[in-house]
Image (cartoon, rainbow, N blue to C red):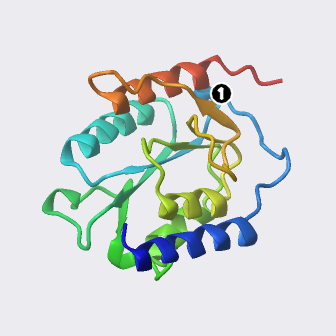
Amino acid sequence: MGFISNLKYKYGLHRLRNDFPKPGNSAVVCNLSDAVSVGIIYNATDEKDFNIVKEFQHSLKKNTNEVFALGFVDKKELENYHIQPLEFSFFCNKDLNWYHKPNENTVEEFVKKKFDILIDLNLTEVLAVRFVLAESAALFKTGRHCEIEPNYYDMMIQYNTEEDNPLLHLIEQTEYYLKMLKVK
């Protein structure tokens, strides 16, 4: 990362921390089988990962009324395989402001939705995605275990990064724990 890129990232992180401090314990716990709406945010740069998330989204749709997926494409432009059904939206680097905050209409619409559960399937730290998580009106947010502050998760999932397909393993672990949640 060059000096200017690093400076932009650090400023974006500063804005994230100041503009969106982690809220108090206001989560509304929801079991996956009771969820009416689920949001998924993920890295859609690689077509293989896009197809894995697409399959996961379709399996969730069997038991959940609304499942929307928002993919971040770490490129200047979208690829041909990003031509999607209505449940999928994308944003890419050209949709970010100079300090990595998304400024695209589909992102704005996504963060306004009051999902019962928001699932972050990003395997690495992406500042643009953290802005989406911070702004999201979702009632319960889950994602991979991370030590970076502030994190915006109500539940963090441990997964094996040594697996042949860490994304698939994270999805399996997320599904397992979201199904186990006991709601009072």
| Picture quadrant of residue 106 | bottom left
Tell me where residue 8 appears, x and y as whole percent: 50, 77
State how many labels appear.
Answer: 1
Q: Is residue 86 left or right of residue 177?
A: left
Q: Is residue 121 above or below residue 168?
A: below
Relative depth, front residue between 18 and 64: 18
In this rendering, the answer to whether 38 lies above or below 169 is below
**184 or 166: nearer the eye?**
166
Name the side, left or right, on which 118 lies relative to 90.
Answer: right
* Residue under label 1: 31
**Quadrant assignment for the C terminus:** top right
Give left or right: position of 150 versus 50: right
Mark 1 residue type: Asn
Image x and y of residue 134, in percent: 65, 60
Quarter of the figure with the N terminus: bottom left
Establish if 92 lies above or below 171.
below
Residue 139 visible? The answer is yes
Percent x, y of residue 55: 30, 35
Q: Secondary structure at mark 1?
A: loop
Q: Is residue 102 visible?
A: no
Q: Residue furthest left?
A: 80
**Residue at the (31%, 41%) spot, across then down:** 54
Please name whichever residue, 1 or 152, is drawn nearer the observer in this view of the structure: 1
Disc 1 residue crowd, few under 14, some 14–19, many 20+, Cα 10 Å: some
Determine whether 83 is above or below 66 in the image: below
Q: Residue at x 69, y 33 (%)?
A: 30
- Residue, x 37% and y 61% (percent of image)? 89
Q: Residue at x 83, y 47 (%)?
A: 26
